[in-house]
Every structure is written in C-alpha cells, then in structure tokens.
Image (tube, rainbow, N blue to C red):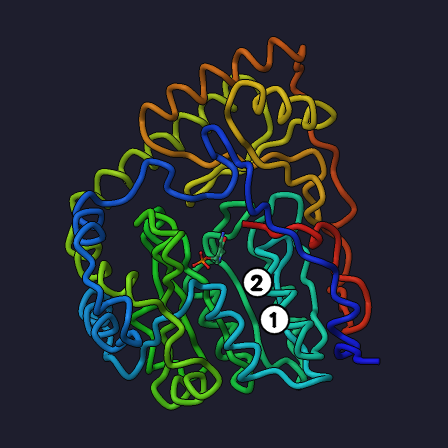
Amino acid sequence: MLRARAVVENLKEYHPPLGRREGLRLDFNENVGGCSPRVLRVLASISTEVLNKYPEREVGELAVAEYLGVAIDRLLLTNGVDEAIHLLCETYLEPGDEALIVVPTFSLYEIYALATGAKVVNVQTGDDFAFPTRRVLRAITPATKLIMLATPNNPTGAVAARADLLAIAAAAPHAALLVDEAYWDFHGETLIDQIGAVPNLFIARTFSKAFGLAGFRVGVLIGDEAQMKMVRRVGSPYNVNGVALACLTEALQDREFITSYVTQVREGRTRLEQFYGQRSIPFWPSRANFVLAYFGSYRKPLVEEMRRRGILVRDRNSDPGCAGCVRITVGTRPQTDRLLRELSEAFAAVGFQPQPRPVESSSTQPATPTAPGSQVAAGAGEVRR
Ligand code: PMP
C-alpha cells in the first residue's frame, strides 16, 4: 500500500476556510478595502499572450528590486510569503535539525518545518507577548538551522527590536534567520538594509496585505546572493503566475493607494485600541493591521454575534497563550466606523463584561520541541492567517 512519509502522515490536517466567508472580512488581515484601481485596469486589458506563455518572473523581479532598493540577485518573487517559508525549510532543514519559532505566531512556519522531518522548537512569549529575545538566544543550539520570526507578529501585533534580531543572527551564524515583514507597511521598521552585511539573514514581504492582492499570491524573499542561489534551486521557475506579474508594476507605482490605505489602517488601529482601553478590555498594542484583545468567556458568543451582524472576526483561543483572545483586522475608515458601532452593540447583545486576563503559566515554560511525528501544537488544525 502506498504510504506518505511518516512525518506527513502525522501532520495535523490543515483546513483554511476556502469559502463562505461572507460579510465584512476582518478575520484574515487582508486589505478588504480593495486594491489599486490601476491594477484593475491592467487586469481588464490582459492579453492572450499573458495567458498562453509561461510567466517571465524576471520582469516582475526587476520592478520589485527597484521598489525595494535591492539588487536583483538578492531577491526572489514567490507564490506568497507562504512559498518563501516553504522554500527556506526545503533549503536549510534536514530530518533531525531544529527550526526555532516564537509562539504564538503564523502557523505555516511550524507546518512546513515539520514536513521536512525537522524538529520545531517553540519559544513561548510571556503574557505581554513581547518578543522574548533572551529566551530565543538561549534556545539556539548547534542543531538550529532555521529561525523564523514575524515582526510585527501575527496574531499579537508585537514587534522585535532591530538590535535584538541582529543579535540573534550573530548568535546563530550556522542557521538561516527569516525575518517575516509581511506587515511591514503598517509598521515601518525593516532590516532590509542589512541584507548582504548579515549573510544568514532573509527578509520576506508580501503583496497580500497593504497592496490588497492576496488573491494574486505574490510575495518576495530577500537574502544574501550566495544563499538566494541555493533557495532558487528548490523552487519552480514559474511559481508566480503571469497575470499577477503583469499587474505588479502598476501596483508598485500607485503609491497614493498604499499611503491612503496605510494611513486609514493606522488611524483605525489607534481608534480600536482606544475603544478597548476606554472599556478596560485587555488588548495588546499592535504595529500591524489588526489588534488582539481578551474577551475571556465572552469570546465565543461575541465572535458569533459579530458574524450575525455581518462582520467576521478571528477567534484565536487555540493559539498558544491566547485563550479567550480575538483578533480583529483593521480596514478603511468607514469599515472602522462600522466595526466600532457593531462591536458596541454586540457587547450589549451578549451582556459582555470586561474581565481581567488571568496570568498564564505559559510565560515560565521552557522552549518546547515539537518533534516530527508528534502532533502539531494547539490550533494548527486551522491556518493562522
Ligand atoms: N507571514 C505572516 C506573519 C502572515 O500573517 C501571513 C498571512 N497572514 C503570511 C506570512 C502569508 O502571506 P502571503 O499571503 O504572502 O502568503
């Protein structure tokens, strides 16, 4: 009988919602305001040739290299950051190696790492979800071959300081360090200038968030040219589709669209945080396009009540250390107006009373390995977008 590899058979099934997400989708950190109208115009005039020929990635890479101010041999366009993560795992992890991640975080780090047969070492953040630099440094071993960190992190919105990330890169020269800057547009701090100077550093960016192009599946991985040569070997030359490539230049040029959207998100983020603060609802200050808050035992009824009101928000209860937490994506100004109005009404409808968040023991736990063959940690049965 045909059997999948043991690590694959033991991976938890992974069911991202692939349909029926009707309403105002504040559950996946997408740009639900749309995308640049200039992209839509290019899309409407796509020629047959774009469809019948294999895509020419280099044209898109030149445009992105110029946009980021990075040499083209240090950059690879990918099928979303998802694929960038996958390629790094394929390039640097062997069975028995250790991949180090900080949890809670984006679930694909763990899934792609485990699928290689490597062990995943989870460094749990404290109750404040602050980036646990010292614990990460302590968890590095000679077997650590890949460290994957998101800043701002998903689902917490917390960021890691530049100096701390550089200290981690220096402490693990034998490991690849991925700094996932998927939410960079809403934060503004980057390590991109260190590419080349720090040979084991990789940065990922995406067009799925601020640019509003999650459906195109375009991300970019940036790293030292010698390392990028290795990463390119494991990927498909046609990983990014021609339609997305044809629209990319226009998307990059419409700075006005991005600026306007990012401004609205930042304002909305402050409004949502103030809304929580005024009601004594525990929340974590965010540098991304979402805010995580604690609703305790009201979490489930609130998520359901919001759904009834046509707004999808994200239950993060099963993420490590996130019991009772809900993450809400921030969108455009009118969307935030609607969100705050509906949230107030939903609170009244379910009789919500803010609860202090109990201190969890997770903050004192040592780094925990998830070995290949064991179950993926809590919550990984669903994708954490
Ligand atoms: N990294 C992080 C931290 C994310 O939260 C997400 C998606 N939510 C991704 C990467 C995936 O991005 P993409 O759509 O480019 O695959």
Residue 137's tag is 1
Q: Secondary structure at mark 1?
A: helix
Q: Nearer the viewer, residue 320 or 350?
A: 350
Quarter of the rendering occupied by the N terminus: bottom right
Is label 2 within 8 A of ligand 1 (CB to nearest ligand atom)? no
Q: Which mark is residue 34?
A: none
Provide residue 370's location: percent of width, then percent of height: 76, 67
- Which residue is the site of mark 2? 133
- Residue 169 lies, in percent from the top left, at 49, 76
Give the quarter of the image for residue 366: bottom right
Q: Secondary structure at mark 2?
A: helix
Q: Is residue 195 above or below residue 244?
A: below
Residue 216: x, y in percent? 36, 57
Amino acid type, mark 1: Leu
Residue found 53% across the figure and 36% down from its top: 21
Q: Which amino acid lies under the numbered mark 2 shown in the image of this protein?
A: Thr
Residues marked 1 and 2 touching at CB (< 8 Å): yes
Which residue is located at x 45 percent, y 29 percent? Answer: 24
The residue positioned 20% from the left and 58% from the top of the image is 46
